[in-house]
Image (cartoon, rainbow, N blue to C red):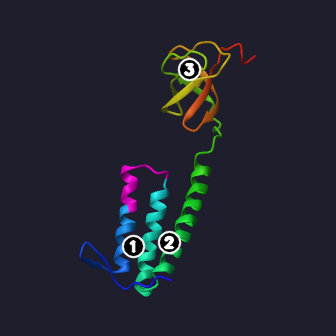
Amino acid sequence: MIWLSQIAIGGIEISPSGLWLIVGAGLCLLELFVPTAFTAVCMGASALLVSLLALLLPSAFGLQIFIWLLGSGGLAAIGYRINKQRTSSTIRSATEAEALTAMMPNQTGRVLYEGSSWRARCAEGTEPVAPQDKLYVVGREGNLLIVMPMHSSAID
């Protein structure tokens, strides 16, 4: 096991707690500039928790690393589950939208759905869509809605 009481970086001595605090804050701030799908925040939050633990056990650096790895993995798994539930591909009961731009079959454009502008793709085998046409929302892929015109022969 690695035992450390002080770490020297560039001639400056830092306690393990201070090191974890710097690493945790840096990882959390990194997420603001480089979106890493929440991973950096999970690792940073875990490092911040380990900085508190390091106050109690400053010389058990190996144990701190092990707890940081477990905490990072656990927080990432919890975050993934929450995000997966939040970005479900199900469409709520409102299934009507209005075209904001013209769209050809299997091409993308913009629609007004539940009061907001969404990126949408016109389903294959449908007729072209003109602006202000009424549409059915038939599916969703992430933030992309799959739509078809209400007057389409593919609906019948």
Residue 113 place in picture, x, y as percent: 54, 31
Residue 32 place in picture, x, y as percent: 37, 52
Residue 72 place in picture, x, y as percent: 52, 66
Q: Amino acid at mark 3?
A: Gln
Asked if residue 92 is among those painted magenta in the image, a careful observer would answer no
Tag of residue 55: none
The residue labelled by disc 3 is 107
Asked if residue 32 is among those painted magenta in the image, a careful observer would answer yes
**Quadrant the C terminus occupies:** top right
Q: Which residues are magenta?
A: 27-37
Residue 35 place in picture, x, y as percent: 43, 49
Mark 1 Cα-neighbour bin, 10 Å: few <14, some 14–19, many ≥20: many
Q: Nearer the viewer, residue 45 or 69?
A: 69
Query: Outermost residue, right direction?
Result: 156
Q: Nearer the viewer, residue 121 or 5?
A: 5
Marks 1 and 2: in contact by CB < 8 Å?
yes
Which residue is depicted at the point 51% across and 80% down? 63
- Label 2 to label 1: alpha-carbon separation: 9 Å
Which residue is depicted at the point 56% across and 70% down? 70
Marks 1 and 3: in contact by CB < 8 Å?
no
Q: Amino acid at mark 2?
A: Trp
Secondary structure under tag 1 reads: helix
Tag of residue 68: 2
Q: Nearer the viewer, residue 117 or 106?
A: 106
Query: Outermost residue, left direction?
Result: 11
Quarter holding residue 135: top right
